[in-house]
């Protein structure tokens, strides 16, 4: 018999979490704390499981999310996470059935798109998702950076102060909301996120170890940046070789961003800095007198987007120039299919179904890749993944869609 797919009940949680951890090759048995935390924030009608002979063999969860699009507007999307299928039950269509049910529910709720962060690249294109942001991590050898590590602090009269978890819980949410309004691709952080980030609530059964927190204050005392980092403790021949690893760096002004990077690069005992996953056009390498000291250690796709309501998704954002574009979107398995006229500009946009001839023909996944402004339509045309139905349409689309700074999602989920 085919496994039974159904919504998960609170009594299913231990088995559901065990199945998820097993598929992700984590220690299978969940801790009591992990179950209690999940149960306290459990949304049964958005959690699915496949059950075979009473055992959970596949998991799937979604939740409400707010996504910032170019121009600063925030749209309601359906965030998908905890997707697994046991190695004993692959190739049986379990993911396809759970995905179809979840996307159908998202469409009925009125979500404009679905989002996820893909553990494996080849899986989600067939469900209409496309990679919409990418991320980069650098490692910096501090001795090679060229910066004068003896600096007295920010030159603008601001200051960097150390903080504790309680202060971060108080200051962080408002700072992040200001950051999120400026950063296309960013997503919201709820109260649970801040509780887990600052150790108030356990996360995933892992023991809490408080990181280092630092804030940047402008000359008038306004908090404009927050830095969170950890350190290993490495000595070689009685010489400090510590690595500082950034877990979060939020800044709402260029001054704050520069000040926090300079602070981190001047910490005593630090031989190298791992930046964590940053925007691919982060200022850090060019902040250094020797940019080659920042070595890329990771560069990969990150947030994937699956359009559900094309007119609302495209009308929500602003565009670099004024113009119009007719898109023929193919979406055999979903709601994004159709022909749409986009009339757009720096002050806003309108998008609606049309009978006009198409300028470009593309799939839902390709639209997901270009909707936040990161991927170039012209590159997808060169790859044969977008058809240019009218000469010059790809160049016109790039001038409309692409953003001055690249979209970036700082958070996994």
Image (cartoon, rainbow, N blue to C red):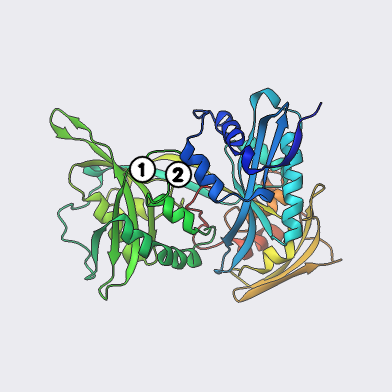
Q: Position of residue 383 (x, y in %)?
A: 68, 43
Q: Are marks 2 and 1 in contact (CB under 8 Å)?
A: yes
Is 68 on the left-hand or right-hand side of 362? Answer: left
Q: Residue furthest top?
A: 88
Q: From this view, report whether residue 277 is shown above or below residue 360.
A: above
Tag 1, which secondary structure?
loop
In the rendered structure, which disc, 2 or 1, sits on the residue that comes first in sequence? Answer: 2
Give the farthest residue toward the right.
Answer: 355
Position of the N terminus by quadrant: top right
At horizontal 67% and vertical 30% (from top left) the residue drawn is 57
Mark 2: give few (<14), some (14-19) or many (20+) Cα within 10 Å: some
Q: Residue 12's spot in the image, x, y percent? A: 64, 38
According to the picture, the residue beneath numbered tag 1 turns out to be 208
Identify which residue, 23 or 114, lies in the foreground.
Answer: 23
* Residue 203 numbered mark, or none: 2
Q: For residue 233, which quarter of the picture?
A: top left
Which structural element holds mark 2?
loop
């Amino acid at each position: 018999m085919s496994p039974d797919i159904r919504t998960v009940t609170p009594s299913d949680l231990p088995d559901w979490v065990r199945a998820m951890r097993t598929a992700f090759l984590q220690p299978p048995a969940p801790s009591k704390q992990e179950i209690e935390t999940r149960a306290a924030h459990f949304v049964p009608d958005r959690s699915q499981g496949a059950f075979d002979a009473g055992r959970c063999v596949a998991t799937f969860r979604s939740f409400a999310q707010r996504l910032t699009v170019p121009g600063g507007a925030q749209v309601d999307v359906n965030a998908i996470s905890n997707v697994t299928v046991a190695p004993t039950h692959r190739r049986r269509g379990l993911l396809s059935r759970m995905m179809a049910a979840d996307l159908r529910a998202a469409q009925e709720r009125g979500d404009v798109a679905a989002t996820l962060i893909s553990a494996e690249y080849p899986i989600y294109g067939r469900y209409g998702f496309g990679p919409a942001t990418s991320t980069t991590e650098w490692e910096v050898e501090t001795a090679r950076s060229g910066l004068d590590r003896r600096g007295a602090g920010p030159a603008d009269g601001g200051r960097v102060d150390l903080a504790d978890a309680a202060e971060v819980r108080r200051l962080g949410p408002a700072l992040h909301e200001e950051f999120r309004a400026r950063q296309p691709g960013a997503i919201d952080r709820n109260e649970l996120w801040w509780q887990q980030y600052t150790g108030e609530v356990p996360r995933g059964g892992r023991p809490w170890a408080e990181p280092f927190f630092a804030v940047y204050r402008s000359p008038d005392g306004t908090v404009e940046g927050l830095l969170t980092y950890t350190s290993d403790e490495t000595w070689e021949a009685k010489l400090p070789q510590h690595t500082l690893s950034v877990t979060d760096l939020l800044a709402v002004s260029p001054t704050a961003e520069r000040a926090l990077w300079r602070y981190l690069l001047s910490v005593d005992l630090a031989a190298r800095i791992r930046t964590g996953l940053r925007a691919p056009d982060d200022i850090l390498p060019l902040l250094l007198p020797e940019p080659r000291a920042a070595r890329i250690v990771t560069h990969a796709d990150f947030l994937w987007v699956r359009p559900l309501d094309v007119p609302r998704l495209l009308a929500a954002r602003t565009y670099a120039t004024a113009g119009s574009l007719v898109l023929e979107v193919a979406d055999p398995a979903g709601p994004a299919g159709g022909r749409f006229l986009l009339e757009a500009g720096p002050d806003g946009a309108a998008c609606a179904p049309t009978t006009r001839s198409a300028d470009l023909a593309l799939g839902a996944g390709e639209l997901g890749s270009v909707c936040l402004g990161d991927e170039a339509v012209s590159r997808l045309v060169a790859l044969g993944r977008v058809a240019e139905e009218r000469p010059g349409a790809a160049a016109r689309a790039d001038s409309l869609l692409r953003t001055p700074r690249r979209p970036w999602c700082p958070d996994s989920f």
